Every structure is written in structure tokens, then in C-alpha cells.
Image: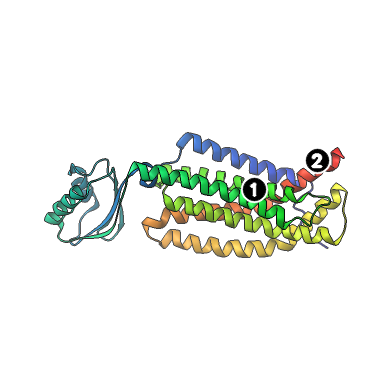
Amino acid sequence: MEHYQFLGRRKTVWLGLSLIILILGVIALFVWKLPFGIDFRGGAVFELQTEKPIEEGEFRQKITSLPQVRSPQISKTGESTYLIKALPIESNDYRTVIGELEKDYGTITEKQFQNVGPTVSRDLARKAVIAVILAVITIVLYLAYSFREVTYPVSSWRFGLIAVVALLHDLIISVGIFAILARFFGYEIDASFITALLTIMGFSVHDTIVVFDRIRENLNRRQLSAETQFELIADQSLTQTLNRSLATSLTVIFTLTALTILGGESIRGFVVMLLIGVTVGTYSSIFTATPLLAWWQARVTRRK
């Protein structure tokens, strides 16, 4: 069957490119770090809409002049609508702020208000880490069980471990790119960021499983032992599933791109993180996971 050759000598190129992008992502994390939002460091966030039109500069000056609002970060989210992030604020002080604003700008409509203390933020951070770790462990066990019928020439555990390596590759690169964008566009890490991470994990593993499952089907049809024979099967499986993987991924990418451009400011960071993760996950399922599986199997074959 005619197919484009993804593996062979090309697999070294794909794996080298993935390694370079991975290193750049790690460097970005060390250089710019992740800006934690109030969900993880504690603070207040409130979105307000003024009755009277107001210039953004004037509103910033007004908020900054109020002693109750400490270390404010202000962004415009709509017509006469502003999102303010600051250190924790007491309920009485918050009402004082609303009263001061209504003196100058008429009725103030409260779109949202959150006040997160440091104890809650620490507990949320701990649960977020636990959620990610449990998800990774569950994925390994599930894949090992699902591929238990494949015992020759590739161990079922190898499928699971490679899928998790590709998953970690996607997460590190996605978080690294987000750190760069956060540096220039003011995004922050909040609870929705963890939701995006878990969603990316599911999507990344889904794409990888589509390819691995086809490899399993093809391996079960005939017994293989030689390195070149396994690479041929992996290459054919990748070609057979390419259209399905791209169709699924591009549909999601187009939708997320539209949301990034047209969606509200309050969800933009979440959507951008999803867009990065889905794009990276699509790339890794083709150019990282399967080449890495073939590379590992080649080393095992040579040792035998």
C-alpha cells in the first residue's frame, strides 16, 4: 500500500524537532515563570459595568486612587465594562468602592465578584496537582489494559508509557508557550487553566490512541519481529489514521480560533490554552508518539 513515509530516517528529524521545542518550552518557563492568578495566590476579582460612558484611562486613575483596592490590575472587557484584579478586599470596603464609583459614573452593575483567601488558594493548588497526577496514572493503567492483547513484538506497557511521554511533552510545551503569551498579554493561571490542562490531556491521549489502536490491529493480523517490519506497520497505521486525526483536530482548532478572536476577555486565557494544547497534541500524535514508539522498538530489536 502506497503511503507517505513518516518513520525510517525521518523519525530522527521529528524527534529532534520535538526535543528542541520541548527545551524552548522549559526555558520559557524558567525565564518568565507562570503568573498565578487569585485562585492560587489569593485576591479579589470583580467585573463592573458603568452606567455612564467613561474613558479607560480615567477609570484606571479612579480605581488606583481608592485605598480599598490594593495593587489593582485593570482590563477593559466590553463597552463601559472593566475587570479588576486586586489583593483581597473586605465586603465593607468593596461596597465603599461601589459607592465611590456610583458618585461619578451612575449605577454600577456587578458582573462578577470573587474573593479568594490564601488558605483556599493553597488547597486548590494542592488538589490541582493531585488531579493531574491521578489522571496520568489512570491513563497509563488504562492503556496497558487496553493493549494487553499486544504482547509481541511490543509490550502493552510500552504503548502506555509512550502515550504518557507524549502527553508530558504536550503539557510542557503548552505551558511554556502560555508562559510566553502571559508575559506579553497579561494572562494568568487560574482554576480554568487546570481545566484546560486536563482537557488537553484527554485530547492528546485520544489522538495518540487512535494511531496506537490501528497499530495494534495491524500487529494482531500478522506476527512481526524485524525492526523494519514493525516500522512499516507503524508507518502504514499512521497514514491510515491521518485523515481522521486531522479532521477531528482541525475542527476543534477552527472553533477555538474563532472563540479566541470573538470571545470575551474573561475566557480568553482558557481558550488560548486549549488552542495551544490541541495544536501541540495534534502534532505530537503524528510526529512524536509513533516515532518514539518505533525508535524504542528499534533499540529493543537491536539488543536482542
- Residue at 73% x, 43% y: name it: 12
Q: Can residue 83 be seen here?
A: no
Q: Which image quarter holds the C terminus?
A: top right
The secondary element bearing badge 1 is classed as helix
Residue mark closest to the camera, 1 vs 2: 1
Could you tell me the amino acid type at mark 1?
A: Val
Say which mark, if any, is on residue 121. Answer: none
Left or right placement of residue 29 versus residue 215 in this view: left
Measuring from the top left, give residue 46's x and y in whole percent. Answer: 28, 53
Q: Residues within 10 Å of mark 1 (few under 14, many from 20)?
A: many
Q: Can residue 116 be seen here?
A: yes
Measuring from the top left, give residue 278's x and y in whole percent. Answer: 56, 55
Name the residue tied to disc 1: 164
- Residue at 54% x, 52% y: name it: 277
Left or right placement of residue 102 versus residue 143 in this view: left
Measuring from the top left, give residue 82's x and y in whole percent. Answer: 27, 54
Name the residue tied to disc 2: 299
The secondary element bearing badge 2 is classed as helix
- Residue at 65% x, 45% y: name it: 165
Left or right placement of residue 18 versus residue 220 in this view: left
The one nearer the camera, 257 or 111, is 111
Measuring from the top left, give residue 99's x and y in whole percent. Answer: 14, 54
Q: Which image quarter holds the N terminus?
A: bottom right
Left or right placement of residue 206 versus residue 74 in this view: right
Q: Residues within 10 Å of mark 2 (few under 14, many from 20)?
A: few
